[in-house]
Amino acid sequence: MKSVLALFLATIFTISVCAQNEHASRTKPAAAGGGKLFGRITDAKNNKGIEAASVQLFQINSGVLAGGMLTKPNGDFDISSLTTTDSFRLVATAIGYAKQELVITFDKSAKGIATAEKDLGNIKLTAESQYLGEVTVVAQKPALQMGIDRKTFDVEKNLSSAGGTGIDVMRNIPSVTVDVDGNVLLRNNSPQIFVDGRPTILTLDQIPADNIERVELITNPSAKFDAASTGGIINVVLKKNKKLGMNGMVSIGGGSPDIYNGNLALNLRQGKFNFFVNGNFNHSGGKPKSETYRQNKSNGVIENYFNQFAYTDRKRQFYSVRFGMDYFLDNRNTFTLTQNFGGGRFTNFENQNQEYLDVNQAPDHFGLRTSDGKSTNERSSTQLIFKHNFVEAGKSISADINFNHGSNIDNTQILNTYSFSNGSVYSPDSRVHNTGSGSNNQVTFQLDYVDPMGDDNKLETGIRSYINDYNSTFNAFSVNNAVETKLPLSNNYKYREMVNAAYITYTGKLVGIGYQAGLRAEHSKFDGELVDSAKKFGYQYPNQIKNLFDALFPSLYLSKTIGDGQELQLNYSRRIRRPDFWQMNPFVDINDPLNIRQGNPALRPEFTNSFEFNYNKTYHSGSFLGVIYFRNTQGDITRYSDTLTAAQYQQLNNAAIDPSAILNTFVNAQYQNRWGSELTLQQRLGQQLDVTPSVDLQYKRVKSNVNNVDLSNEGFNWEGKLIINYRVVSKTALWNKWSFQATGGYESPEVVAQGKRKEMYGVDFGLRKEFLKNKATFTFNINDVFNSRKRGTISDTENFYQDSYRRWDVRSFRATFTYKFGKADFQLFKKEKGGNREDNEDRD
């Protein structure tokens, strides 16, 4: 940590020195001359000076920047060392104001000689909001912006997620699905989740939907991005207002089941500082149901049956506070500091009713399992960013350091009772008490350099270092007569994950074809240890010189414009997916005594070669994006299930595990091939209605052999979404400015190594009314209108056949009221009276 911090500070110092040297060279006269321009930038409405407005002066003939500065607190500026015989274009900009441009020449005397100074007087900027006036805007920017390399989704237009969390946002984005455990999938792959372009320790259900500005989907990342983004990247961009003065938003909401939320955001932009703070609270409940139907077999012959029905009374509570500031050292150097604190409180009370049936499906005995679990977690994230923009447009260098910390505490009481159908005792009750705690620290340092090198060329390069330290203690106790006996399930473990990387990409154009070639090199190391047994596991890539290619990740993008609004692109990238801790940790999870889970320490990373062909067309009333893709994954990490062996059952004795329980783990398959086509259309139908249908077609083949058992499987699956938006435009105030949105999604069955995932579908609905001159908004939404969103799986092996489903959530209703406020001339730091009179007076 100290070395990373020292490197970061050294980088900041080096960049600052370079910036000073560049500034010094920039202030030298472009040519001989002593001309000077001066004036004041003012607000057109109140004629007050605007502080920190950007004033840039360009030579008209050459376009070279002749000078520039940020205005003083009273709006004054002056630019010296100008050639008086030249003509100039002055560009004045300020956040929250429309840009103003002037053509300037020095005045000439009667003898035709240019004067040395020119007073431009007050240059008035108009607040951008004044352009709206009383105009009713009907045509709006679409919620989904489609590009060749990414899709950008505007969360503000997602009515069904208002007042919810990041999970609610993801359910309504094309190409994105959410599984039964709340994990997000992109094209049925696990993507890497970023917040503001950087890794995060936060989960998506800990990020309020109201705090998200937009979501970016990058399906085939270039070498600039982490090589561990095999499944693509989902970048969550949080809101941060930089308008002048004070601006804010407050929202409050409630609904069923047991839903209430609140959010407050404030932003202050004054002078060289921009301060922001946001606080959020979100509470939700629900009682989802899960079912399991199993046939236990021996050599393919059914021996008995087992059914399980479970209800989980779940309460989830999240809070977060996020604050920070931007410091504009000048118009080319910016420091940003952001701090986030958050946490959650969760309770889960579950009843599992179990039926044990004989070969004729007659009842043998019954079981009742109750589980009362409570957990808490705390999260914090600190980010420091420095960015320097060079004189050349688009040329920049930036450095940032991120530190994430998390901790958690868990406590669960489990009771198992068994009885015959007549109510008599089948076996003694068993009690288990589980406790756990853990902590996690992540540090990321990154340095990026961008040089446009002309109109059609661009060089990008950078380095990155990521360190993740995690430790956890889990204790399981068998409880008899109030005496607790520690079980072999108890687990004390820790690990360190480290990834160091460097990348370079070059963008250019050749015979009308644009290209971007890139190469990323990464060295990764994972060291895990079971502390109590001193058992170690992990990996290092590359671990030998001959495996150097395991550390190299090339990418290539080719693009061609073939007509008005039409573009073709072909791209390739090589990526890696490293097994995460839970997939490798040999710890046994017994929350479900019939379906237990365990990691596999022998797992290896998987490598994917990804190809995409894109066609994008934009036209007056919409756009279309068609994608054909192919992915070959060597060593595919996949789930594997089997019944417990006698040795495994003996190890788990006294932990209330059924002898016919299924053990779920992970293995490396030989390979997986996935062919697919994704089609997305965004179409406006008139000025009030737009529809966005999307469909993803896939054919998957998995080749795998475990313990001489062929687990290979293949099949076709597809998923589709339809988003419909309708806006009411009426002369009657009561009906005007209503918006309606309906989102429907369907996922077909999909093959897995030992069976298939069952189909899933759901519909969300939302409506919104804007009033009080668009300052206030009322939103009402229904998530999962038909209460149909559940994830099912069918597993079919020689030893068992199981048909089961689980739910993450239930149908919910939520109403949210939002109010926006602001004051452009608000000042936190009042100027002292009696100062320099010239600085406090307005010019005539």
Image (tube, rainbow, N blue to C red):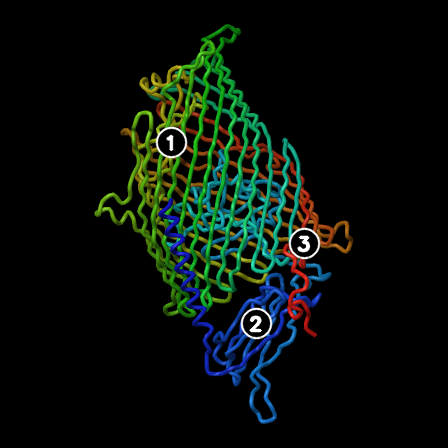
In what element is the residue under mark 3?
strand
Quadrant that contains the C terminus: bottom right
Which amino acid, mark 2? Val
Which amino acid, mark 3? Gly
471 relative position to 204: left or right: left
User: Is residue 273 at least partly visible in the picture?
Assistant: yes
Please report the residue visible at 53 percent of the width from the left and 84 percent of the height from the top.
84
Which amino acid, mark 1? Gln
Q: Which residue is mark 2?
A: 91
Query: Which of 537 and 148 lies nearest the eye of the viewer?
Result: 537
Pinpoint residue 547: horizontal percent, then vertical percent.
Answer: 24, 46
Q: Which mark is residue 822?
A: 3
Q: Are marks 3 and 2 in contact (CB under 8 Å)?
A: no
Please report the residue visible at 63 percent of the width from the left and 38 percent of the height from the top.
261
In what element is the residue under mark 2?
strand
841 relative position to 612: left or right: right
10 Å neighbourhood of mark 1: few (<14), some, or many (≥20)? many
Residue 698 vertical placement versus 430 (above, below): below
Residue 60 vertical placement versus 44 (above, below): below
Residue 76 vertical placement versus 367 (above, below): below
Query: Which of 790 and 832 lies nearest the eye of the viewer?
Result: 832
Pinpoint residue 512: horizontal percent, then vertical percent.
Answer: 40, 69
Pinpoint residue 198: horizontal percent, then vertical percent.
Answer: 45, 48
Q: Which residue is mark 1?
A: 754
Please report the residue visible at 54 percent of the width from the left and 58 percent of the height from the top.
623
Distance from label 2 to label 1 (Cα)? 65 Å
In what element is the residue under mark 1?
loop
Distance from label 3 to label 1 (Cα)? 58 Å
Q: Earlier in the sequence, mark 3 or mark 1?
A: 1
**Is label 3 or label 1 in front?**
3
